[in-house]
Each structure stands twice: as structure tokens, then as C-alpha cells.
Amino acid sequence: MIGYRIIILILTTICLSMMMANMLTFNFCIICMTTDNYDYMEGNIKMDKLNDLKSGNYSNQSMQHAIKIFITNKLQSSNQQDKQFDNNSLQEIDILSIYPNGTILYRQCFLEKAADYQYTSREQSVLFAAIAIGALLAILPISFSIQHYGTRKTFAIVMVVSGISTAVCPLAASFGVVYLTIGRILQGVGFAACMPLLGSVTSTWAKLTENGLFSGALTSFIQLGPVISMPISGFLCSTSLGWPSAFYLHAIITLIFLVLWWILYRDQPDDVPWISAYELNLITDGKIDNKVKHSDEKLPIREIFQTSSVWAIWIAAIGNMYSIQMVVVFAPTYISQVLGLPIVSVGLTAALPTLLQFAVKILAGTTSDKITSLSETTKVRLFNTIAFFGMGIFLIALAYTPANRTTLALIFLISSTTILGFNTGGFFKSCTLVGRQYSYFVNAIVQVIMCIAMFTVPFIVTSLTPNGLSEEWYYVFILHTGFLFITNILFCKLGKGIAAAFTSNRIAVDNITGAQLKPVFL
């Protein structure tokens, strides 16, 4: 029978993933919101002077151009009586066949529907970055709310804000970019709870030997968010329901899981009436007294900021968050503009890298827990190196791959994102092991770093790729590779896998040595 803590793990992972998916809905839908829709109509026309063109001294390209001019003039002349297409809607003529009797079979491309909105490059950057503004404003209040009012109430309010703000985004867009920016800021308030919640749930509900599993599953919201959002948004954007339906569906799903969260989650395992005594013992064995409420504990902020192993976590978070934000936010743009894939394919393809990374995160987290021949410090450094150096190597390969090598470019893009999943056994696990009962605060700073990355990455990428060319993306990939390499070297120098000294006021002395990390057999 599945343990109740696993139900909590699955539920929390889904709720966190919806916070991410709500945020990413706009990142995909902006393609549909700002793209003109074209349609095609085939026809035929008789050109009496076709033989004159053939006998003249014309190249094939010149003759094609002359025929297109002839057809365009005929169609525009016809449009003066038939208003099915106006002059401005005529976009392109393709010559399909030319018959000996002068009949020409052509295909006319015309503008069926103009884009709903047109945003400048700066406006798009602001809309992308607005999430980070909201999250940065809310991250510390949410962290202290968890401290004083508990995780259950805090995250329930956050989910309400996220769901409602997602639902009103289409309406806000109709009022103007300022109102849409406000809606995006409110989405950021919902997103701000993700990392503090991750630390709180792991320290409260995971067994001491399940830190890797919980860290792997809960941090996978970054990967599962795109898996949920990209295919749904891609499908709905291409249907008659249009892009607004993507926002509405995400909001409905969020509110459904809000209800489940409120029913099933409790701030302490022993507050759950239907949990077994055996599982409760598994969860609480070797931990602090779970009956002590958050508000009774004093947060050792000064000691936390003076701990080098905590700074190692935050430094690693810089490389991780900048790189993953580059992929999550701009993979659809790169796949669509540089590699030239259609909208529906973009949604599925953009979701694939993060889906595979989710599988790797779960595998890496459980593998890290099962390895007993290495110390926890060695393991977090090893797994982080595999993640960061692995992604960097694939990004370098992607930087040197021509845009016309679509399959190879996709392989490198997918591989770079997939291998980063080993970070769950790296700095993410280190956060829980080092911070223990205060890991929610350490993760809150990780969330701040993530928000800063979300705010700055759009400006970095758009400034480096003003024309969306493959040659410009080279600098994006190389820059983020540098972030990964430098931050990993510093993490390997300073990072640890044992409880920090500031946790010792609530943990038995032998726990500080790392004894609590060994398997517990009951």
C-alpha cells in the first residue's frame, strides 16, 4: 500500500508544477498572440502572352517573377469588384504548374486573420520578466508566512492568487500591456512559494533516507511545468478555441488541485488522523520534535549567511537557474524561429527536454539515496558536476551546430536539459541536508536567485539575439556554459552534504556528523 507521505509528495509535486505551468502559459501563447494567421487558395488563370515570355531571353527565375506580377495584377483588379480579399491581404503567389495552352495553376497565400496583439521587443521582455518582479516582492513575506502560519494556509492562498491571475490574463491583455503586466506580476506571487514550500515539505514529510527522492520529485516542478503547459497551449492555440482557452484551462486545473491540497495536506504528519503509527514513526525518526510549531523557533539568519556550505548552494543555484530559465523560456522561440518547426510541433518538442529531465531527476535522487559507499559531501559534489558539466558540454555542441542540422540540434538541446536532472543529487539535495529544519529559508534564497534569473534572462537573450539568427544564439549558449562551469567549480570547493552548525540547537549532536544520513532499518 502506498504511504501517505508519498501521496503528499505526488500532490505537492503536481501543485508546484501547476504554479510553473501557469507562468509558462504566456511564454508559449505569446507566439499565438503575436502571429498573423495565413491561409491558401488555389486557382488557375489564362495568360495569353505566355509563349512570348517563353520565347524571349528570360531566365526561369525572371519568367516566374513576370508571371507572378501578371497574376497579382489580375487578382488585385478582380478584388475591386470581389471584396473577398483586399489589396493589403495579398501576400504571396506560388506557381504550381504551367500548361502549354497558357493556363497557370497557382496558389495564393493571403492573410486570414491579423495577430491579436503586437508587442515591441522591450514590451515582450517586460512581460517575461514581470513574473520575477512579483516573485521577488512576495518571496520573503511568503517565507515568513510559512514560518508563522504554516505551509498549508500559505500555499492555499498562493494557489488562489495563481489560478485567478492566470484566468484573467486574456482579459488583461485586451485592456493593454500595462494590465497584462500586472496579471503577470500576480502570477509571480504564486510562483514565489515554490522553493520555500519544497524545503518545508521535504523536512516535514520525508524520511531521513528519502531526502534525495523528495528533492528530486519536488524540484521537478521546473521540468513538469513545461510538460503540462507546452503541449496544452500548443494544441489549444491551433484550435478554434484559441489561445485564451489555454489560460482558462490552466486556471481550472489549479483550483481543482487547490481543493485537494486543502483536504489532504497538514503542516505536521501527526495532525493527519488517517496516517498509520508505523509510517508516522518512519517520518519522524531521528528528527526534531515535530510538535514544536514553526512560530516557536527563532530563525538563525545571521548564522545561515555566515555558513560557506549555504553559500555554495546559492552559487550553484545561479548557474542552474540561469541555464534552465534560458531553456524553459526560450526553447519554443529557438525551435520555432531558428529550427523552423511548426507551432504544434514546437509545443511537443519544447516539452520533451524537461520531461526527460524529470525522469533523470527521479533516477538521480533515488540513486543518490541508495549509494552508501560515498559520503554525502562527495555525492552532492559528484552529482552536481555531472549535471553542470554535462549540460555545458552539450550547450557547446549546440552552439557549433548549424541551424539546418535540425535533428542534431534538437538532440543536443534535449540532452543538455536532460542531464541537468542530476542536480537533484547535487546542490538541491545539499540544501536539505545542510539546512535541515531551516531548509525552507535556504530554498527561499534559491527562489530569489531563480527570480533574478527570470528577470534578467529575457533581457540577456533578446539583447544577444535581436534578429533571432543561429549565429546570435551561439553567444547565448556559450555564456550560459560559462555560468555552469564556474559555479560548479565553486560548489565543489565549498559544498557539503552534512547538517550545518546552525541546525544543532534542534538536532542531536551525532546528527551533525552526518550519521542521520545513513539508512535506517526498522
Image: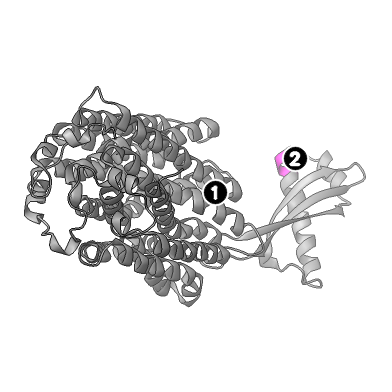
Q: Residue furthest bottom?
A: 175
**Disc number lying in front (1 or 2):** 1
Where disc 1 sits, the SS reads helix
Of residues 352 and 202, the one nearer the viewer is 202
Q: Which residue is mark 2?
A: 58
Q: Which residue is mark 1?
A: 347
Residue 456 x, y percent position in the rendering: 30, 54
Viewport quadrant of the C terminus = top left
Q: Earlier in the sequence, mark 1 or mark 2?
A: 2
Reply above or below: 378 against 230. above
Q: Is residue 251 magenta?
A: no
Q: Residue furthest right?
A: 101
At label 2, the amino acid type is: Tyr
Of residues 139 and 342, the one nearer the viewer is 139
Judged left or right of residue 453, residue 415 is right
Residue 362 can be seen in this image: yes
Residue 475 x, y percent position in the rendering: 35, 39
User: Which stretch did the figure color magenta?
Assistant: 59-63
Q: How many other residues sit within 10 Å of disc 1, few (<14), some (14-19) or many (≥20)? A: many
Snapshot quadrant of residue 141: bottom left
Tell me what residue is drawn at x 55 percent, y 62 percent: 246
Q: Mark 1–mark 2 contact, CB under 8 Å?
A: no
Reply above or below: 484 against 103. above
* Disc sitting over residue 295 in the figure: none
Residue 456 can be seen in this image: no
- Number of on-image labels: 2
Reply above or below: 501 against 450. above
At label 1, the amino acid type is: Gly
Judged left or right of residue 279, residue 31 is right
Residue 405 x, y percent position in the rendering: 53, 31
